Image (cartoon, rainbow, N blue to C red):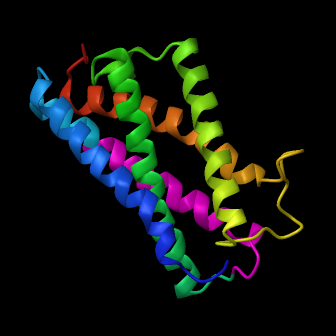
Amino acid sequence: MNELKLTQFILPVIVLFIVIACYNYFGNKASKKRVFKKLILTICSLAFLFNVVWEIAQGPLYEGFVYDFGHISLCVLASVADMLMVLLLYFVFSIFYKQPYWVNHMTVPKITSLVFIGGIGAILGELRHVAAESWSYTNAMPTLPFIDVGLSPVLQFMILPTLIFMLADYLLKKSTGVDLP
């Protein structure tokens, strides 16, 4: 892992503003505001937790990574950006389905779309960061043919968002007893 660069913060800051705007928009339209807030908090918590574990686990696949305070801190920071990207995915799908409780009705087409869009987003992100030399892979990192990006970060965004949304819906139903519309 190379040194942190200011340009690495531009996209997450833009995403943060988009997420805040979408949160306000859907928060005002939500029929059950308390449930909506709890859903977003649950998605944030799960996204951060799952991504920090994934980031730390895949750390040795990146050049120069060691399990020290500095690198673990970078994993935590990356997990905040990952959490924002998961929220962006959630809100993009909320806009597409015209309702914030779409996670209650996970269907094969929704899951397929999440996996596809998450994978494409991860590929684009990896291409950008590798080209900017934000990081580089060790020989242990399996890469996707033709595009030469790491398989692990692509799988991260193909798997985790769906898992997070399904688990958030389950935990919300269990804690509130409310079945989302």
Left or right, 79 with reference to 177: right
Nearer the observer, 4 or 131 = 131
Nearer the observer, 54 or 28 = 28
Q: Indicate the quadrant containing the N terminus: top left, top right, bottom left or bottom right.
A: bottom right
Vertical relation: 44 (above or below) 64? above
Residue 159, image x and y in percent? 61, 38
Residue 57, image x and y in percent? 66, 64
Residue 24, image x and y in percent? 16, 39
Vertical relation: 94 (above or below) 67? above
Query: Does the image show residue 76?
Result: no
**Residue 131 falls within the magenta-colored stretch:** no
Left or right, 173 with reference to 161: left
Query: Does the image show residue 96?
Result: yes
Residue occupying the point 23% across, 47% down: 20
For the image, the number of numbered tags is 0
In the image, the segment drawn in magenta is: 41-65
Residue 143, image x and y in percent? 84, 52
**Residue 43 falls within the magenta-colored stretch:** yes
Residue occupying the point 61% across, 21% down: 112
Vertical relation: 168 (above or below) 63? above
Q: Indicate the quadrant containing the C terminus: top left, top right, bottom left or bottom right.
A: top left
Nearer the observer, 101 or 113 = 113
Residue occupying the point 87% across, 65% down: 140
Overall secondary structure of the magenta section: helix
Residue 48 image-quadrant placement: bottom left
Residue occupying the point 46% across, 17% down: 106
